[in-house]
Amino acid sequence: MESVRKYLSFLFTFVIFHTTAFAIDSDAMKEGKKAFSKKAYGEAIKKFTKHADSHPQDGEAYMYLGYIYEYKKDYPKSIQNFRRAADLDLDKDQRKTVLLKLALFFNYHQDWNLSATYASRYLKYDPKNEEVQKIYNRAVGNKGNPSSTTQTYSQPTKIEPKHETKQTDSKQTDSKKDPIKKVDEPGEDKETTKPSESYEQILANQPNLEDVRWDYVLALFDEKKYDKAESNLNLLIEKNPTRSRYHYKMGIIKLRLDEPKAAIESFARAKKNPFSKDTNVFLYYVYLNEGIAYQKLAEIDKAESSFQEAFKQVQKDTPLLALARLYEQKSDWEKCIQSSDKALSFNPNQVESHMFRFVCMFEAGNKTKKFESSFTKYSEFIKTKFPDPTQTPEKFQVGFLKLARKYTENNAFDMADSYFAVLEKDQTISTGREYLFYRGRNYFYGGKIDLAIPYLQKTTGSSAAHYLLARCYAKKNDITKTKEEFQLAAELKPEYWTSASLEKDFKEVWKDNSFQEFLRTKAGKVP
């Protein structure tokens, strides 16, 4: 261990004073580093915490916090921050140091799952490191055995990983109807270090090695060989039918195979005998994925209940975002706003939460400062990350129609049309009244009258659409068409009879006596 400590000390010195190309040096980070170098740890903690709050994906601040609490001998907080750092953005040398510290720590406390996890992650960067390979081999050899040492560290709450969640393997054809996404899974299931083939020879000679078969299942799952993973997992369940993590993983596999009913049955079995370590975290993931399964079956009330249960287990933004998505589908604008608000209190930079709050506040007519804030966050994210709107993932397109309408209101007509154009391929949206009217309206106010007319003509039963058409034809000095559309608009909304003289668009047709007579007699209905 002494050699490992010396190695760590060297790495620490190198990482701290090595400026990386990927570092985010905010003012708070710079001030924190200065305070850290002067051993003014109280001030450094404040600055690094401030930086972490404004840069939630940057792991460097958490790495420094880990070192500070290590110096202060507050090991639970030190490890908590190192674990956060390991799951966020770091450069290679920083990540290696953090992973090594974690592997050593959990090896010392004989937490074999986590020791194996962090050792394996380290070996991806430095596969020839013999010390870490020994730690990994020891951890794998002891996996599942009771520890002879009482664990005295505090198990930190895992934060959201930095990768964006993706949609399920089955192709999504309507992001508003089926916006199901993969979610994170309990930590013990997330790390496999070898390809599935490496386990096959072992199992061919020793088919009863339960831990090896379990690792084989995880490897197959990572490789998306779900059918093979399912058959091997069934063998494990036959031998150990009460083991909760087997049933949980089977539920996840069934979700990937697009069998939500079978997934729900597996999750129910997992809940009967929940995982004893970090039970709340385990149940959090069970309920979260159960909600996704119910959502795929369009059992909205049950999905809502499952997401609420997930939030009760661990208070994070993910189930709140799932609820916001659910309420947006139900057109329950107020609940959608409340869930989005609450999700943003946990994660202020979560773009999807801003998207749903923007959409639902738009629908509810609540155009407050929060509405403008979410519009800014959402629109800037799309413009920055996806300059070509057609490349935007479907999960971020839920707000495109409202985004286009907002840009029309802001007189950014070409920008609005770029988002309308993306939605044109979605028949469910592009044939709807909202899309047709507001795209026509965007063309009208953008001065593209001939492009506006076809969209407004398809907007049936809308007084506003007929009135805009009357204004279009008035601009083209087509008195007959102007009268026709004006009359259709006024039959649906009589106030239009008295509004024509106020519109500049009718200036030319107003010169025609027949048009004046048409208005005065309300198309001949009034003497």
Image (cartoon, rainbow, N blue to C red):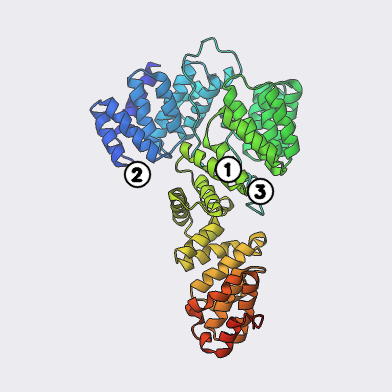
Left or right side of 16 for 385? right
Tell me the element at label 1.
helix
Q: Nearer the viewer, residue 274 or 373?
A: 373
Tell me the element at label 2.
loop
Q: Position of residue 7 (x, y in %)?
A: 36, 24
In this figure, which residue is indicated by the disc labeled 2?
Answer: 21
Which circle marks residue 335 in the picture?
1
Outermost residue toward the front?
527
Tell me the element at label 3.
loop
Mark 1 or mark 3, earlier in chain:
3
Mark 2 belongs to which amino acid?
Ala
Mark 1 belongs to which amino acid?
Lys
**Which residue sits at x=66%, y=46%?**
169
Q: Is residue 225 visible?
A: no
Q: Nearer the viewer, residue 73 or 498?
A: 498
Mark 1 or mark 2, earlier in chain:
2
Specify few, some or many for label 1: CA neighbours under 10 Å numbering under 14, 14-19, or 20 or more: some
